[in-house]
Image: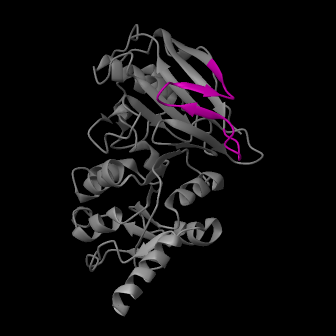
Amino acid sequence: MFYRFLVILLVAGSLLCGTLTAAEPDPGSKPKGMKVYVTGNSGWVTTNHGEGFIYMGGGAECDEAMEWMTAKTDGGDVVVIRTDGSSGYNDYLYSDIGGVDSVHTLVINKASYADSTYVETVIKNAEALFIAGGDQADYYGLWNDTKVESAIHYLIDTKGAVVGGTSAGMAVLADVDYIPDSYGVYSSEALADPYHTYMNYLEDDFIQGIPNTYGIVTDTHFSERDRLGRTITFMARMIQDSVRTVSQTRAIACDEGAAVCIEANGSAKIFGWSGYTDYVFFFQADTAPDRCTSGLSLNWTDAVTVYKVRGLPTGANTFNLSTWTGSGGSWESVNVNYGVISNDIQEPD
């Protein structure tokens, strides 16, 4: 009787603290040769975590967006996945941002790692998953149709954890992903020829089903790398190639210092670095392109309408993906006249 009473007290105490230890499965041993970095508790906890999604534009991370993510974990475990060997998020998230039980970074740079039970279990154990910047072609080539992808779907569809990414990590969390198999296309190249070699490929078969993102393609490092033209061309190709209809075709582009933190219902806060004018851009297609043909410049006289909204440290400016409306920003029309942008809405710092 005393033993049963003691167990009840321990469980109740754990619940009051927000966590219940030893409830997640042990992943076992990592695959031979795989790099894994762990900061904090090497085990796993379960918490009363919240659901959400993060799109981040690349460059140095927006601290406030990361604080939003760690708060959603309710003291849980963060897993970072990438293909390079860096452990840079571990101390940053565990010590500088804080509020988490652990940070596990998995370097998943082999197909055998991506299809291992260890990697699958570690990802499923997360209260938040963050996909680091890198090369989205590597992510797509190594992780598509593997246990990595199925584990991410588990977090989105079943567990209701936070899933986010920056730069290439943001790219693969779109509904339609730009996956260049060589060099990323410049806006000038895309506008001059929507079927330019570096426009390959737009894929819609990886990490599908994030709520309120159907028909969305993303772009990052937006104003800093002059990517307005190529984002619009991505949208033109989606319509021209019947990937999505006009009414379905949308885009989200982030400057390097900006981030979109999205609730499960589609409402989002727009965070940004203090002292910088970094924006997020929400595009919707207005009509089909007038001319989107291989070897000829793009002509789209009634192209897109864009909600341009500045990221702030407070997250005071907002956008709702379910209603496609926002606060704190402004609507802009952007057209393409034979390869020339009519209204350059970018704000490079």
The answer to whether residue 110 of the structure is visible from this angle is: yes
Q: Is residue 157 left or right of residue 55?
A: left
Relative horizontal placement of residue 241, taking residue 247 as reference (left or right) = left
| Residue 333 magenta-highlighted | no
Q: Is residue 42 visible?
A: no
- In this view, the residue in front, 100 or 198, is 100
Tell me the quarter of the picture where residue 221 sits. top right
Decide: is 126 above or below 7: above
Q: Quadrant of the N terminus?
A: bottom left
Residue visible at 23% across and 61% down in the picture: 111
Where are the magenta residues, as a range?
A: 311-331
Q: Residue 129's quadrant in the figure?
A: bottom left
Counting from the top left corner in percent of width and height, residue 182 is at: 36, 44
Q: Position of residue 292 (x, y in %)?
A: 37, 14
Q: Could you say which is closer to the camera, residue 338 or residue 320?
A: 320
Magenta run includes residue 327: yes
Q: Give me the residue at 25% from left, 53% from top.
A: 150
User: For this view, does 264 lie left or right of residue 137?
Assistant: right
Q: Is residue 73 left or right of residue 234?
A: right
Q: Quadrant of the C terminus?
A: top right
Quadrant of res 227: top right
Q: Position of residue 333 (x, y in %)?
A: 58, 14
Instruction: Report the residue at 43% width, 15% height from top.
Output: 297
Number of numbered discs overlaid on the protein picture: 0
Among all residues in the image, which is located at the extreme front? 1
Looking at the picture, does residue 285 appear above or below residue 68?
A: above
Residue at the farthest right position? 275
Residue 131 image offset from top left, x and y in percent:
43, 55
208 over 7 or under it: above or below = above
The main secondary structure of the magenta stretch is: loop
